[in-house]
Amino acid sequence: MLRSSGLSVFAALGLAVLGGCALPGNQARTLLSISVSPATAQDNGSAAGVQFTATGTFSTPPVSVSPLPANWSFTGFLAAPTPGGVTIDNTGLAHCVGFKGTTLVFAIHPADPNVAPPEHISPGEELGFVGGNALLTCS
């Protein structure tokens, strides 16, 4: 009886060691880049606004995810003021209301896909995040 359970333990340890050697290392899935579409858009103050979409490119399958949830803003990691008269919501829907001109639109997400996008990002917090951008012209 002891011999049989001893063999079972030895066999289990052997399989665990062999299994660990045969499997590739745990490669963490990482967000590599974000593209924003459309790359350029124009809004004349319409009620519909402009819908931006973020697409994430990852290190392992599924390689492309769209739409990618993101933190949407007009400042990204820049220490620039948000232009008045233009808004963007957490889905990427932008509206021009009084603003005339062109502004950058940023989509930001943590490099770790298991972490949700933050509600707010301050300048200097870009470490660990990936960003993409587009241009919005308000006329």
Image (cartoon, grey):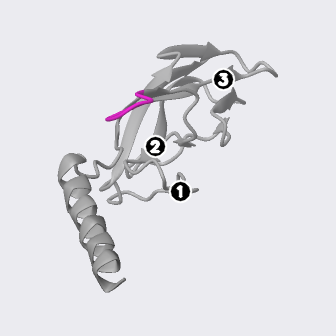
Quarter of the image for the N terminus: give it. bottom left
Range covered by the magenta-colored residues: 57-63
**Residue type at numbered disc 2:** Ile
**Residue type at numbered disc 1:** Pro
For the residues labelled 2 and 3, the Cα–Cα distance comes to 16 Å
Q: Is residue 94 above or below residue 22?
A: above
Viewed as shown, does residue 109 lie left or right of 66? left
Instruction: Give the SS element for disc 1.
Output: loop
Percent from the top left, x then y, of residue 5? 35, 78
Indicate yes or no whether the magenta region holds residue 58.
yes
Percent from the top left, x then y, of residue 52? 59, 25
Mark 3 / mark 1, whichever is N-terminal = 3
Say which residue label 2 marks. 108
**Residue type at numbered disc 3:** Gln
Task: Name the residue located 66 percent from the left edge and 23 percent from the top edge.
Answer: 51
Mark 2 / mark 1, whichever is N-terminal = 2
**Farthest right residue?**
47
Viewed as shown, does residue 24 lie left or right of 124? left
Percent from the top left, x then y, of residue 76? 43, 45
Say which residue label 3 marks. 51
Dots 2 and 1: beta carbons under 8 Å? yes
Task: Name the residue located 66 percent from the left edge and 30 percent from the top edge.
Answer: 94
Viewed as shown, does residue 68 lie left or right of 27? right
Mark 2 / mark 3, whichever is N-terminal = 3
Percent from the top left, x then y, of residue 128? 33, 54
Viewed as shown, does residue 20 lie left or right of 2? left
Closer to the camera in the image, 130 or 85: 130
Task: Name the residue located 74 percent from the left edge and 21 percent from the top edge.
Answer: 45
Say which residue label 1 marks. 118
Task: Name the residue located 37 percent from the left edge and 48 percent from the top edge.
Answer: 111
